[in-house]
Image (spheres, grey):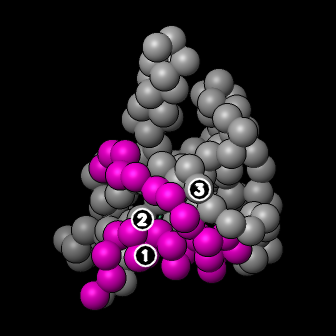
Amino acid sequence: MTSKIIHVAVGVILRDQQILLALRSSKQHQGGKWEFPGGKVEDGESVQQALSRELHEEVAIDVTHSQAFMQIEHAYPEKTVLLDIYLVSGFTGEPHGREGQPLRWVTIAELSNIDFPDANQPIVERIQQHFSKQQGS
Ligand SMILES: Nc1nc2c([nH]c(=O)n2[C@H]2C[C@H](O)[C@@H](COP(=O)(O)OP(=O)(O)OP(=O)(O)O)O2)c(=O)[nH]1
Ligand SMILES: [Mg+2]
């Protein structure tokens, strides 16, 4: 078993106070779960370059505004991932699943009821905190 940590660029894509999710295919690691679109950072790429590339490849959007949000390291039995999560608040194009994967928009409250990979629980909590503070201020 390899001890290499897999670095993943993850986009929390926002539009009209909703967030875009994609269904991971049954053949993928954590298949059948909903995810924030994204993928592995390749050698020589910055995380933001990887984010832009992955979101273009997976959901056909071009990122125009993103900001670092949080990082999570999570050990699954078979691999350890470092999720590098960005808020994507500006993009061009209309999202669609370019790899045939279903997409859905959910409200921030609805995130609590989604079947995500285990690593994602702290992301959901942080998003909900972040946006409840913003609304209250
Ligand atoms: N994109 C994404 N990956 C996540 C999330 N939560 C989580 O544990 N992961 C894990 C699952 C995978 O082990 C890894 C991401 O890999 P990926 O399958 O998206 O990578 P990729 O797009 O480069 O795909 P591939 O070319 O290897 O098929 O991170 C999430 O919300 N979004
Ligand atoms: Mg991916």
Task: Check mark 2 vs ligand 1: CB closer than 8 Å? yes or no.
Answer: yes
Mark nearer the viewer, 1 or 3: 3
Asked whether 9 or 100 is in front, the reply is 9
Residue that label 2 marks: 9
Asked whether residue 55 appears in the rendered view, the answer is yes
**Position in image of residue 12 (x %, y %):** 54, 50
**x 44%, y 39%: residue:** 123
Q: In 3D space, how far apart are the residues under numbered discs 1 and 2 (Cα atoms)? A: 6 Å
Do tag 1 and tag 3 residues touch (Cβ < 8 Å)? no
- In the figure, residue 49 lies in which quadrant? bottom left
Q: Which residues are magenta?
A: 44-71
Tell me residue 2's x, y (percent): 23, 76
Residue position marked by numbered label 1 in the rendering: 50
Local SS, label 3: strand
- The answer to which of marks 3 and 2 sits earlier in the sequence is 2
- Inspect this view and state whether residue 40 appears: no
Q: Amino acid at mark 2?
A: Ala
Instruction: Indicate the secondary structure of the residue bearing disc 1.
Output: helix
Name the side, left or right, on which 79 lies relative to 95.
Answer: left
| Residue appearing at x 47%, y 69% in the figure | 51
Q: Which mark is residue 121?
A: none
Q: Residue furthest top?
A: 136
Q: Are circles 3 and 2 on residues that touch, CB within 8 Å? A: no
Give the amino acid type for the residue marked by disc 3 in the picture: Gly
Q: x%, y% of residue 24?
A: 65, 62
- Cα distance between the residues tagged 3 and 2: 16 Å
Residue receiving disc 3: 90
